[in-house]
Amino acid sequence: MTRLGNNSVQFEGYEIDRARWQLSWRDEPIPLNRKTFDVLLYLVDHADRVVSKDELLRTLWAESFVEESNLTQHIFLLRKALSRHTSGTKIIETVAGRGYRFAAAIQEQLPTPNQTVVTATQSVTRITIEEEMDTPESAFLFGNVTQPPLAPLSVKRRIYWIAGASIVVLSVCAAGWLGWEHWLDRSGGAPVQVVLVPIEGTTGDAILDKSLTQALRMDLAQSPYVSVVPDSTVQATLTQMMHKPGDVMTPAMARELCERTNSQGVLSGNIAKVGQHFLITEEASNCVDGLAVASAKYEADKPEDLPRSIDRIAASLRRKLGESRRSIARFDTPLLPGNTASLEALKDYTQALLLANQGKFADAITLLKSALQLDPNFAAARYSLAVYYLSTNDFVNGREAVMKAYEVKDTASEPVRLAITAFYETYSTQDLFAAARNFRSWTELYPHSVQAWNGLYIVQRDLGHHADAAASGLKALALMPINQALYEDAAFGQMTSGDLQGARATLDSAIAHKLDGDRIRSGYFKIAVLLQDPELLRTQQTWIEAHPEAAYCRMEQAYMAIEEGRFDDARRQLEELTALLRQQGLSGLADAVTKSIGMNLIEAGDRENGIRVFRSVPLDPEDGDDLVGLAEAGDFKTAEADLQALRSKYPQGTLSRHYFGPLVEANSALANHHAQQAIALMEATRPLDDRDLYTRKFRGDLYRSTGQFSLAEKEYRAVIAHREIESESVDYTLSWLGLGETLASEGDRAAAIDAYQHFFALWAHADPYATYLKQAKQEFATLQTGTLAR
């Protein structure tokens, strides 16, 4: 069967337009070189059978002799181009021992009667000419053609001739320039993803061996075209394949890993040492049959030259895998700056990454400090140091590390520079809107970067842009579906945007991927509270009892206790939780939770105990939440002094301008009996109203205190309607009480009674001494029997 007469062929969202000699995906052209397109057409035209390799070589390379590996490379490029569909169908199948088969279902569009059908031979010839002329060399060649002698011309005709010749020359120059630009931009099709296998052989230094693999990973990471499967994904996938950590990666394992991660190829290498001389080779192979499609090798005279050899190998592989020359030139920053490069720094850095992957952040930080003493301009190490400090809630050292990383950002590769800039905007300028723009640019340039999408998710979450955060969280999860924390983040984004069933489905997917654990169960806990699902809540409680080390779940239990007015339980749970966190090496997180629980207790009416808990750990004068806590504790002098210093240091700070700054000032104004001034100050928080429930509830309290009951009711109802923003929040409970008091003041007895009853239901198990509970009971009794107060 043949389809040479069909003008258009469609399959799996792709279309082949024979008249234009174009492959496209949903109207987006996919560039293919001539011979790869020929292979595609031949397989499509003979889709009713298996086409042998010999037949393809004999037919498509009839006038020349080529090796089988050449055909394999074109099959690799073709599979790479046909990797955008999501159905899971393998479009080009390898039939072991026989050849290849086009396996997708084909939809054909026949030409109209007036259309001219171009034969395959004619089309190939035409394309060959176009490709030959599409080079700088061909443009210059045609510009130097010798013309035969011309007869004498009149002055007028000579002017026309000169003008015409000038136009021709300009056209040829323009063609040459356009050809050069096209040559620089020409790529091999859609981006590719590869599995990086540890380099075999040895330098005689085991740490250096690992460092070279890490160096190659970092070099390739700056490519927007070639992405490497993250090491964490590799390890998790190997576990699913029933392999143990440390098992030697065989070619068969690598190919299976490649297919399981939906990659297009495997990168494997070797290092050979002869005296102090080294030879490094790296090869890209097809993940289906293991045949090589690209290779590169470089020599190094001494160990110190090895990182630069890795740089050259990475650039060579990127070009051979299809990345354009312009892209490589733009994103080809050396791993280590030439004037300060330190091989020992690279080794310390690699060891630090391995320790961090095991959760040993303190040890990783020590090694990174050592690396930076050896090489102060090692930007990637400075960035990682900042990340690890912030990951352990050490914001004081984290902010300092971010500042120092920003000073050397221009020596970094593009993805590291973008990461440093985003962290700088988040923690140093504290301009979250600028940070969001930078993260967005990062995702556009590196759409396969989990770090970029996860960073964008965090900033969008902190701004209260929950729908956007959910989308970013799901993008990050799709890129690394073996990370438990990303499931929790994605589910949290869905939950806060109101998609509770979607959030539950995301967590169910984590369980299906055998990623059950503390963070997944804490997500279920939140959803159970929001859905008011007692069975789901009991299931999570049972799981928590069987897993006493589950710190995140115990955190949710402590917040829930405060929401329900069980202050004694909350303080006891906090004591157990902080001991557990410190035991796990998370002292920074233990301090942060302590301060948060203390602030919640103050707001819930357990003021004396809340202040004691809040002040039991060190406070950070640059942490906005700590400043709000100081204001709630009544220390307005310290809070306002720290706020003024913070605003001077970070004039563009988003949260100081639109969140904690106005909250500190409004609390101070209210304490001085200036409620109207406090209301005016709180207007600055409007852009971040969806960040949490506190600002709206506090604004409702202010309106009620000044007799603006309709405005107070609106704020309280907004809190109640958006409980999903904070699943265990005392602001939700107290908004029912505030709504009851507001409705009573408005004279709506029935609605007020209903609001009070909601509050009593939520505090059915509250401590009997709870201030707001006793107050509510007195008010409710008056509401039922007495005259409504106005």
Image (cartoon, rainbow, N blue to C red):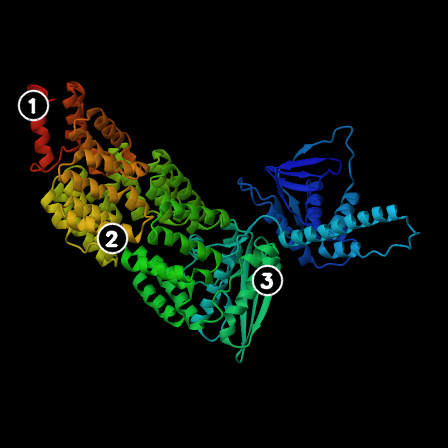
Q: Earlier in the sequence, mark 3 or mark 1?
A: 3
Q: Is residue 600 above or below residue 346?
A: above
Q: Amino acid type of disc 3?
A: Ser
| Depth order, front residue of 62/349 | 349
Residue 601 screen position, x and y as percent: 15, 43
Distance in Å between CA atoms under marks 2 and 1:
48 Å
**Residue matched to label 2:** 645
Q: Is residue 33 visible?
A: yes
Q: Nearer the viewer, mark 3 or mark 1?
A: 1
Q: Is residue 60 visible?
A: no
Residue in the image at 10% along x and 38% along y: 767
Q: Earlier in the sequence, mark 3 or mark 2?
A: 3
What SS does tag 1 mark?
A: helix
Badge 1 crowding class, 10 Å Cα cut-off, few under 14, some 14 to 19, many 20 or more, is few
Name the image quarter holding residue 342.
bottom left
What SS does tag 3 mark?
A: helix
| Left or right of 661, for residue 191 | right
Q: Amino acid type of disc 2?
A: Ala
What SS does tag 2 mark?
A: helix
| Left or right of 311, for residue 368 | left
Image quadrant where one finds the C terminus: top left
Q: Nearer the viewer, mark 3 or mark 2?
A: 2
**Residue matched to label 3:** 316
**Residue matched to label 1:** 782
Distance in Å between CA atoms under marks 3 and 1:
82 Å
